[in-house]
Image (cartoon, rainbow, N blue to C red):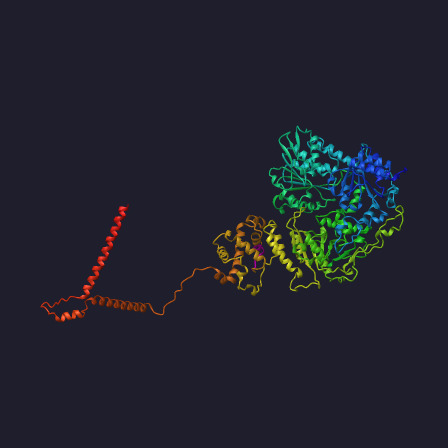
């Protein structure tokens, strides 16, 4: 049965085609797929050109396959079962066969970036996220349409209670019920979009789209030549530059006035040839950034630039860039294969993407793609183009800058969520440097000229597109202008912290919506990492809460108060011991509860996850109120609030004081059909802002925070007594910063802690972290700035009052056994006396550094001295690196190091000198003691003894010689009988002499016999020979 389509639908489509504006249709019902063919047919007739291309996005499964052969089999089965209407089937099959339909899974939606379609179909609403919504809708060209299919809905209000797929990530063990605030606000926002129509599956317009009742065809405002005002200005610009080469032919390729002005600005920098300019092109998606860069590079080739390099996260991102480089060459009358050749990559990962263009018309010129980390190849570069710079880590982008012309291009507002890193940090630094050269930046950024170009006019659709305005308002994409300057800056002590009720905040009331836009504007302007998905997290996550810092509120005024600071808090913890054990065993942590899971992983502690805490997700201060103390005031008030100093802590037995939204907008649906259902914002809402003394806080044990580690941020949190327990060893891929987590224990009676410990139960964990961090400084954190490392380590360097018990010399070296030896002490003594060089004590310096920063050597040092000890001892840096960081001469560094080691040696030698002396090995020495007898007496005594010995020896020898002459009995008898002669000499024969002679003769005889026997032996030996 045929039915006439409502003329208002056709009028909306035709008006969109005339104005180059997009239109949106929400079809509710199980047969909504059948109406896609009718809408596509009406769009084709209105466009008056080839059939519009279609993008069909889905979660995981299509009703009818996108594969032609599989689809024919599937349709055959449906026909056999009688489940198919032949007329509708034929029309739908023709659409799939002829309609240039591109099917895309939601998870693969990144591959459609940069493409343009005439119609976009979104099914499986439960799988949609804000990022997916923006990414797909932005591919539709002006005059096209977006179709959102909602099936199996009994009423529109059931959309608010629909369980979304992303809600699984919002649930935690202690917070399991996600709200539907984002869907409620989405549904209410559709009613306010003038180009959106909500229909059933028979194309009946629902009462929610009552604004379409008065729609009428619109005439197109054109001049006599058929041009709009913007087109007229662009035409005048092209006419003015038509005679200028090479900009004249290239400017004719521009589609918008903004794009034309951007190309002219690029040419000014190219023709200047100062090679010290940096031109940044920033815009939202679909503004023609890559096309403008491609045309500018083609002009640079015509201007004589030889070495041009282009970098991007992947060559796939440069498809549009190289396409417009070739279009620029065509406009300049360059012929492919004759004047230039295109080279595609042989790398299978790059999928045959263009990586180089060689130009040979005038001289050898090259446009070469390099990967972002290959900055060492830029030694001969003249022009460097960085496309999609926001998707490249910020330190890598900085390393690419140098003394040559640089073109930057990036998306800084929109749905990618990384552009703020570039605009908040690098572009701000470049802008400050260009305006104040005397405060130049370090390294390659000093002395450069900086220009920034912004593109506001869209290429795909005309300005004033209602779908763009609706999407920006729904997802808070373009909120930079929504943040007014504070009317005054009150003292931080006069400000109060308020709790924000999220039911009221996302109710889509006028004042609530304005307050939400201001809050998101403040978050976007103060934080580099933002995404539309953050808005859904803020709305639906059950564990997240919002606080705002306001100045004194004048209740007599009807205007909204100025927001000075926003704090987003996530409640974590209360995890069972079994879940903690399972996480440790599996090595995988569930979504949410970042601090408990990371703490459990780092310290293998299963008790900590059971504690309850709050993690500060983000804290954003108004950009015009920075460094005025508002952030510190907000943190102090939040800490006092959770400690129960402002309001009594909520007891577990009482009902939790949280947001309840069981009815929401479903109170409007009183069992009526969708054709009669009225959807309006709720009226019985609680106050948007609740003073802290009127809301009882949850019972918490700690407050934590996680952020990218920078010196300013870390010092801010350390000032509020937050202490680190984790620093990631691998830096972030977006910012190049290490993720850092800090903790602050709250005063709580449930934990037994040492009252003398400032950090309470966290003290032993913090001590362990400091030891581990000091050991990792020589490897994973070797390149960390010394100031940041000193702040993280937070060493005690001032020991004014040293406990005498700590200075006890008993066993000092025993405590350093295996670490420091007596020989090390001797080498240290020699170095401190300037008797040797540093190489002899380099290993000792590392040892002493670890001992000093562990508070084992309590010696007072200055900050600079401790920094030198950290760089050399813990980070093991080279002297040249320390010179660059500390901006000191090498001689000054040596002098500081000498003073440090001298102080350390003086302390250790003073308390352990005897122990060191006894520990040294020594040779055994003979002890010489004085005698009791003097030398003279000793000499006399010795002489006397010698004389006595000589006398005894002399007497003994004389007696033995005279003994042979003694007269025996025989001799005496012979003498008695003999006569005495006249001579007086009597001769008597002695028997002793005879015996002696006989013995002498026998001795001689024996010796003679022995001699004769030897001679005989010799003669016989000779004969044998």
Identify the residue at horizontal 15%, vertical 66% (top origin): 989
Residue 607, image quadrant: bottom right
Residue 395, image quadrant: top right
In this view, the residue in front, 148 or 483, is 148
In this view, the residue in front, 818 or 454, is 818
Q: Is residue 672 left or right of residue 247?
A: right
Q: Is residue 373 visible?
A: yes
Quarter of the figure with the N terminus: top right
In this view, the residue in front, 747 or 993, is 993
Is residue 960 found inside the magenta-colored segment of the image?
Answer: no
> Residue 268: x percent and y percent?
67, 37
> Residue 264: x percent and y percent?
70, 36
> Residue 165: x percent and y percent?
77, 48
Instruction: State the extent of the magenta-drawn residues as a range.
Output: 859-866
Quarter of the figure with the C terminus: top left
Q: Is residue 465 above or below residue 171?
A: above
Identify the residue at horizontal 79%, vertical 48% (top origin): 164
> Residue 298: x percent and y percent?
68, 33
| Residue at the far top in the pictured view | 338
């Amino acid at each position: 049965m045929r039915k006439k389509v409502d003329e208002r639908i056709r009028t909306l489509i035709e008006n969109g085609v005339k104005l180059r504006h997009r239109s949106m249709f929400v079809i509710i019902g199980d047969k909504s797929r059948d109406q896609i063919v009718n809408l596509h047919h009406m769009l084709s007739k209105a466009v008056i050109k080839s059939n519009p291309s279609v993008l069909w996005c889905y979660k995981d499964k299509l009703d009818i396959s996108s594969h032609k052969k599989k689809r024919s089999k599937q349709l055959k089965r449906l026909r056999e079962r009688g489940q198919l209407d032949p007329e509708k089937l034929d029309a739908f099959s023709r659409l799939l066969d002829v309609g240039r339909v591109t099917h895309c899974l939601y998870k693969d939606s990144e591959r459609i970036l940069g493409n343009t379609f005439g119609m976009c179909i979104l099914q499986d609403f439960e799988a949609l996220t804000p990022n997916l919504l923006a990414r797909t809708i932005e591919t539709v060209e002006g005059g096209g349409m977006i179709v959102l299919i909602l099936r199996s809905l009994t009423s529109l209000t059931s959309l608010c209670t629909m369980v979304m797929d992303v809600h699984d990530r919002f649930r935690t063990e202690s917070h399991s019920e996600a709200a539907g605030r984002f869907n409620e606000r989405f549904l209410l926002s559709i009613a306010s979009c003038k180009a959106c129509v909500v229909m059933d599956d028979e194309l009946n317009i629902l009462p929610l789209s009552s604004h379409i009742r008065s729609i009428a065809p619109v005439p197109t405002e054109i001049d006599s030549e058929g041009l709009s005002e913007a087109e007229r200005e662009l035409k005048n610009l092209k006419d003015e530059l038509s005679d200028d080469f090479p900009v004249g032919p290239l400017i004719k390729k521009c589609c918008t006035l903004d794009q034309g002005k951007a190309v002219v600005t690029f040419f000014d920098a190219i023709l200047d040839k100062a090679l010290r300019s940096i031109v940044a092109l920033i815009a939202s998606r679909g503004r023609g950034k890559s096309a403008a860069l491609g045309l500018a590079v083609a002009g640079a080739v015509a201007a004589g630039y030889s070495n041009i390099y282009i970098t991007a996260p992947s060559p796939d991102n440069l498809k549009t860039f190289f396409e417009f480089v070739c279009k620029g060459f065509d406009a300049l009358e360059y012929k492919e294969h004759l004047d230039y050749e295109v080279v595609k990559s042989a790398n299978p990962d790059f999928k045959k993407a263009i990586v180089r263009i060689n130009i040979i018309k005038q001289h050898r010129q090259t446009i070469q793609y390099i990967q972002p980390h290959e900055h060492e190849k830029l030694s001969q570069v003249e022009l460097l183009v960085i496309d999609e710079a926001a998707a490249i880590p910020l330190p890598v982008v900085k390393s690419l800058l140098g003394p040559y012309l640089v073109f930057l291009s990036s998306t800084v507002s929109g749905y990618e969520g990384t552009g703020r890193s570039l605009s908040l940090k690098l572009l701000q630094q470049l802008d400050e440097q260009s305006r104040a050269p005397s405060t130049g930046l370090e390294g390659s950024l000093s002395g450069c000229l900086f220009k920034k170009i912004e593109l506001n006019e869209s290429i795909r659709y005309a300005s004033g597109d209602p779908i763009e305005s609706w999407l920006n308002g729904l997802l808070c994409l373009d909120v930079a202008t929504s943040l007014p300057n504070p009317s005054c800056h009150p003292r931080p002590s006069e400000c109060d912290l308020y709790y924000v009720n999220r039911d009221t905040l996302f109710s889509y009331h006028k004042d609530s919506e304005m307050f939400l836009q201001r809050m998101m504007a403040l978050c976007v302007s103060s934080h580099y990492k933002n995404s539309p998905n953050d808005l859904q997290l803020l709305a639906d996550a059950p564990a997240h809460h919002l606080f705002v810092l306001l100045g004194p509120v004048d209740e007599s005024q009807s205007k909204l108060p100025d927001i000075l600071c926003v704090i987003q808090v996530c409640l974590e913890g209360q995890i069972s011991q079994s879940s903690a054990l399972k996480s440790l065993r599996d090595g995988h942590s569930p979504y949410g509860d970042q601090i408990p899971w990371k703490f459990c992983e780092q310290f293998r502690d299963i008790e900590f996850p059971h504690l309850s805490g709050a993690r500060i997700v983000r804290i954003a201060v108004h950009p015009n109120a920075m460094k005025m103390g508002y952030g510190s005031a907000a943190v102090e008030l939040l800490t006092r609030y959770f400690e129960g100093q402002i309001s009594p802590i909520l007891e577990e037995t009482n009902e939790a004081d949280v947001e309840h939204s069981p009815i929401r907008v479903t109170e409007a649906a009183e069992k009526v059909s969708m054709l009669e259902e009225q959807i309006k914002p709720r009226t019985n809402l609680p106050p948007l802002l609740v003073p802290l003394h009127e809301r009882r806080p949850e019972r918490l044990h700690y407050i934590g925070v996680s952020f990218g580690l920078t010196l300013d941020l870390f010092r801010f949190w350390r000032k509020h007594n937050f202490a680190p327990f984790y620093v990631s060893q691998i830096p972030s891929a977006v910012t190049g910063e290490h993720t850092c987590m800090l903790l602050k224990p709250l005063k709580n009676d449930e934990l037994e802690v040492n009252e003398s410990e400032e950090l309470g139960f966290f003290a032993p964990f913090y001590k362990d972290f400091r030891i581990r961090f000091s050991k990792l400084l020589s490897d994973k954190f070797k390149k960390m700035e010394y100031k940041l490392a000193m702040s993280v380590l937070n060493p005690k360097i001032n020991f004014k009052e040293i406990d005498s018990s700590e200075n006890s010399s008993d066993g000092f070296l025993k405590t350093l056994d295996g670490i420091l030896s007596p020989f090390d002490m001797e080498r240290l003594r020699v170095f401190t006396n300037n008797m040797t060089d540093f190489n002899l004590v380099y290993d000792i310096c590392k040892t002493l550094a670890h001992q000093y920063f562990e508070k084992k050597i309590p010696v007072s040092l200055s900050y600079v001295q401790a920094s030198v000890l950290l760089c050399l001892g813990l980070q093991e840096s080279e002297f040249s690196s320390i010179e660059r960081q500390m901006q000191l001469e090498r001689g000054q560094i040596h002098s500081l190091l000498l003073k440090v080691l001298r102080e350390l040696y003086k302390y250790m030698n003073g308390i352990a000198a005897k122990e060191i002396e006894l520990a040294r090995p020594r040779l055994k020495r003979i002890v010489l003691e004085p005698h009791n007898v003097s030398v003279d007496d000793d000499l006399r005594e010795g002489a006397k003894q010698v004389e006595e010995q000589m006398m005894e020896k002399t007497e003994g020898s004389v007696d033995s010689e005279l003994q042979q002459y003694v007269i025996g009995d025989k001799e005496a008898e012979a003498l008695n009988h003999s006569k005495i002669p006249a001579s007086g000499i009597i001769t008597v024969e002695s028997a002793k002499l005879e015996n002696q002679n006989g013995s002498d003769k026998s001795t001689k005889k024996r010796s003679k016999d022995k001699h004769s026997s030897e001679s005989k032996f010799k003669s016989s030996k000779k004969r044998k020979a």
